Amino acid sequence: AQKITQTQPGMFVQEKEAVTLDCTYDTSDQSYGLFWYKQPSSGEMIFLIYQGSYDEQNATEGRYSLNFQKARKSANLVISASQLGDSAMYFCAMREGGTALIFGKGTTLSVSS
Amino acid sequence: NAGVTQTPKFQVLKTGQSMTLQCAQDMNHEYMSWYRQDPGMGLRLIHYSVGAGITDQGEVPNGYNVSRSTTEDFPLRLLSAAPSQTSVYFCASSPGARRTEAFFGQGTRLTVV
């Protein structure tokens, strides 16, 4: 079974609009971490935001926020006021215990003017 | 500050050849991992290490070997390259605490003909 599911292969948004990228996860651990990464066309992996399973508040980093719904096991990324430079592939990832990050298949975001 | 360095950046191999992808980090991170990225598949974990002398298999370990003799280095060996191993390979490191993100190298694009 997939541990990280991203159901949106592609998303389209206009500049200055907000967009939500979906991520659901599967774990039986009580303590885990959730991450979002951005991969532009140049290929590098850029860390965006982190949410811990025990964090009571949703994480925010500038225009990025993470809508964490623990009971639903979802960790959606919200990008406010989209910019052309936000066009990229976005990956949701999870770390359980003493292991490496496990990634979803990604969502391609296209921002148009 | 170099971070995570992968070499080479590009490589073409013939079927059956062996080679080693190099990964080095200068951040004294305990955790290191190797991923492969294929279109539509996201990043899939090949092998990972939680410290020198300790390695474990990820989701797609077949055809790859790793060792971790030092904290800094985590080479990935392809024993007998196959066209199915054509991919982009990423090495990542992290301090190990659950809350910390992974830092990625720039990737190695490998083609097996």
Image: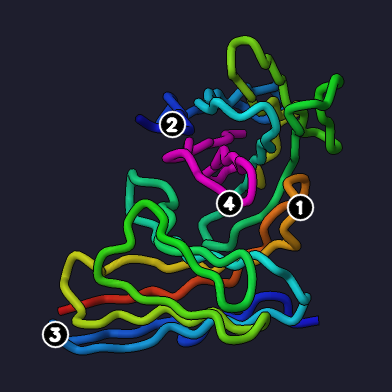
CA separation, marks 4 and 3? Answer: 31 Å
Measured as percent of width and height from the top left, residue A67 is found at: 71, 20
- Give the residue type that dot 3 points to: Gly
Disc 2 and disc 4: Cα gap in Å?
A: 29 Å
* Residue in the image at 32% along x and 72% along y: B64
Q: Which residue is at 42% across, 68% downward?
A: B89
The residue wearing badge 3 is B16
| Mark pair 4, 1: CA separation | 10 Å
Choose between B58 and A90: the one closer to the eye. Answer: B58
Label whose residue precedes the other's in the sequence (2 or 4): 2
How many angstroms separate mark 1 from mark 3 (CA)?
39 Å
| Residue at which label 4 appears | A99
| Residue of label 2 | A10
**Foreground residue among A29 and B46:** A29
> Do badges 4 and 3 share one subunit?
no
Q: Chain of mark 4?
A: A
Q: Residue at x 61, y 81 (%)?
A: B5
Q: Callout 4: few (<14), some (14-19), or many (20+) C-alpha neighbours within 10 Å?
A: some
**Quarter containing the N terminus of chain A:** top left
Is residue A98 within the magenta segment?
yes
Q: Which residue is mark 1?
A: B97
Subunit bearing disc 2:
A
Q: Secondary structure at mark 1?
A: loop
On the image, the x and y values in percent for residue B2 come to 74, 82
The chain carrying label 1 is B
Chain under disc 3: B
Q: Is residue B78 above or below residue A81?
A: below
